Amino acid sequence: MEDFAIDPTVRSAPESLLVVAAHPDDIEFCVSGTVMQWIERGTRVTYCIVTDGGAGGYDEALPRQAMADLRRAEQVHSAKLSGVADVRFLGYPDSFVEPSVDLRRDLCRVIRQVRPQRCIIPSPEINWARVADLHPDHRAVGDACLRAIYPEARNPFAHPELLKQEGLEPWIVHELWLMTGPTPNQYVDVTPVFDRKVEALRIHTSQTAHFDDLAGLLRQWLSEHATAGGLPPGRMAEAFQIVHID
C-alpha cells in the first residue's frame, strides 16, 4: 500500500486539465468526482469526446443520428453541472475507433489549443477485472492519446499543418492520469462530491435510465477503489495510474 497516494491533496490541482474520453458519459462514470474537486480549487477544464455516441442507448426505434444528437446534449448539460463549459466533440463513429493518423492529428490540435498541464485519458491496456472497461474504443482512444501527447503534440514536425496553417505551437504535457487501467497507483477520495457525481451521471438518461439503483452501483465500484487504495471504511474513490512524461 505504501506506493499508493490516497489523499486528493497529495497532488495539487493543475492550472489546466484536458480530459479525453471515447464516449459521452465515460467521464461521469470514471473521473468526474476528481474533476469537480479540482475545479473547486481553480482548475480550468476542457472535455474532449472522441465519438458521436451513436451506438449507445437502448431504444431501438430511435435513429442513430438522433441518439448521437441526444448524447451530445446530455454531455454538455452534465459537464455544465460539474462546472465544465468547454466541451469539444470530434465526431468519430461510435464503436469503430482506431488510433489513426487523423485521430492523432485531431487530438494534437486540441492539446495545442488547450495547452493543459495535465491530461486524463483512457488507458490503452486491458483491464480484465471489469467488463465495462473492455470497450475497444476506450483502448483505441487511449493509444491515440498517448501517441498524440508523446511525441506528436510537442514535435513541430509532426502534423506540420497544425503549426504552418493553423499557427498552433507545440505543447508539452508533463503528466498523464490514466483511467480504467489495470494498475492504478493513485486513488482520489470523492466521497464529498458523490451525490453530485451521481446527479451528473443521471443526466445521461439515454444510458442510465435502465439502472434500478445507479447510485448503489457507483457506490459499490467506488468503494472497491477506496478499499484497494487503503481508504477508511465508508469512503469512495476514483482510481488512476499516473504517468510522468519527462
Image (spheres, rainbow, N blue to C red):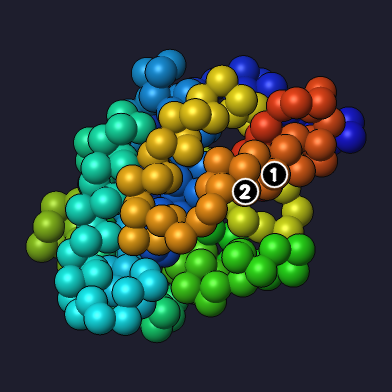
Where is 175 relative to 165, above or below?
Answer: above
Where is 39 relative to 128, above or below?
Answer: above
Badge count: 2
Q: At 84% across and 31% down in the image, what residue appears?
A: 230
Look at mark 1 in the image and give the residue it sits on: 220
Where residue 4 sits: x, y (%)?
79, 34
Look at mark 2 in the image and give the residue it sits on: 217
**Do the residues bearing badges 1 and 2 touch, measured as CB atoms within 8 Å?**
yes
- Residue 218: image quadrant is top right
- Residue type (three-letter) at the residue carrying disc 1: Gln
Determine whether, in the image, residue 37 is placed left or right of residue 246: left
For the residue pair 209 and 16, the one nearer the viewer reads as: 209
Separation of marks 1 and 2 at Cα, in angstroms = 5 Å
Secondary element under disc 2, as helix, strand or loop, is: helix
- Residue type (three-letter) at the residue carrying disc 2: Leu
Number of residues whose C-alpha sits closer than 10 Å to that of mark 2, classed few (under 14), some (14–19) or many (20 or more):
few
Where residue 27 sits: x, y (%)?
44, 49
| Residue 208 - label | none
For the residue pair 202 and 237, the one nearer the viewer reads as: 202
The residue positioned farthest toward the left in the image shown? 165
- Residue 224: image quadrant is top right
Secondary element under disc 1, as helix, strand or loop, is: helix
Q: At 55% across and 73% down in the image, what residue appears?
A: 135
